Amino acid sequence: MQRLGSVQQKIPCLFLTDVKDDPSTKREYQPFRVLATEQINPKALDGDIYNAIPTEKVDGTCCCITRHKGQPYLWARLDRKPNKQAEKRFKNFHRLGSSKEFIWNVEQDFKTVPDSWIPAAKMLQLNGNVQPDENGHIPGWVPVEKYSKQYCWHSSVVDYEAEVALVLRPESSEQNLLEITIVPLSDLLEQTVELIGTNVNANPYSLGSKKHPIHLLVSHGTIPVQNPPALNQKDLISWFQESKEGEIEGIVWHCTDGTLVKIHRHHLGLKWPLPDTYLSSHPVVINVDLSTFEHDFESKSSFTNFSKLNGQRFEHLKDIHFDNA
């Protein structure tokens, strides 16, 4: 599982990358694309990549669990971004292709953030100011408060009075079987997690519906990659394109020394999202029993909705719908 201390450090790609002249599809100011070469990244070799554990890169929004107000809290990703004037200078700088380094004035160039905002761990600091990354953002976190309008989908998966979260994870008794269950927030403390669901990143896993949305937390590093390919570009491309197991966003390898290494389909010039995904095709069992809690969960909460499905098994994750509860 990915710990909070390692969050937002740039995870190296499995392969060394090369710059292509095609415009980036992710950043409008970037007149190039970064694609993988066939050479294994030395950072991956230093981490003993051949003995690392491959896990699925889940497509959602990154969150973390750390303390706030004296208890474990869910925190949403919130990057501190440049103001309009600074962003314009930054984009023009990249368009001109200058070989010099762009100089930020952190105190003046960035938008304000809530007082509760904290920067991500281990970010570079200069003269007491956290420095932006290569994309001009200062990664950070903000606590998700109950009934938050801005982070309503985040708040739907936690209950701070009961100090629990709704989690999707592998079920230990059967290969490929997933379970949706309640986990104490204290068990997730100092971990990073991914929020997935109906209203996150265009819902690549086909969860819920607009009328009955479904959102869940997935701890990073908990979904194993099935039948992973050899660590060369040809086999990886074939695996992503031709196998059911390869219908995922990417792979994150967890090395024994704590190093993380990743490959995204975009690194290989491959499409994402897909019409169907491997994760959404998994069978899943619902283990959400509220009778064990001395707490009254709200009648329309996700916890209550899942409790109505407690003990049921679905052949595919995407088959779950609250309107059938």
Image (cartoon, helix red, strand yellow):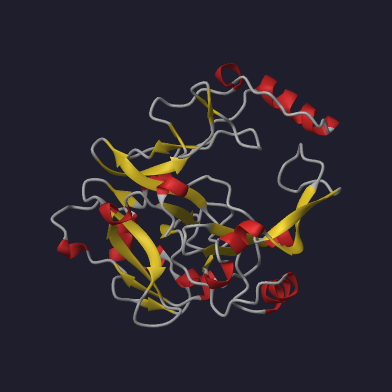
Q: Quadrant of residue 274?
A: bottom right
Which residue of the protein is positioned furthest toward the front in this rendering?
A: 46
Q: In which quarter of the image is the N terminus?
A: bottom left
Residue 248 visible in the current orientation: yes
Q: Which of 183 and 44 is in front in this view?
A: 44
Q: In which quarter of the image is residue 268?
A: bottom right
Relative image position of residue 254 (x, y in whole percent): 50, 63
Relative image position of residue 304 (x, y in whole percent): 28, 59
Q: Which of 8 and 115 is in front in this view?
A: 8
* Left or right of residue 66: residue 126: right
Q: Nearer the viewer, residue 238 or 177?
A: 238
Residue pictured at 52% horizontal, 54% vertical: 60
Q: Nearer the viewer, residue 266 or 121?
A: 121
Relative image position of residue 10 (x, y in whole percent): 58, 47
Q: Is 105 situated above or below 209? A: above
Q: Is 13 situated above or below 142? A: below
Residue pictured at 16% horizontal, 53% vertical: 295
* Left or right of residue 299: residue 105: right
* Left or right of residue 45: residue 283: left
Q: In which quarter of the image is residue 243?
A: bottom right
Residue pictured at 43% horizontal, 60% vertical: 218
Which residue of the protein is positioned furthest toward the top in this rendering?
A: 108
* Left or right of residue 128: residue 108: right
Q: In which quarter of the image is the C terminus?
A: bottom left
Which residue of the protein is positioned furthest toward the left in this rendering?
A: 294
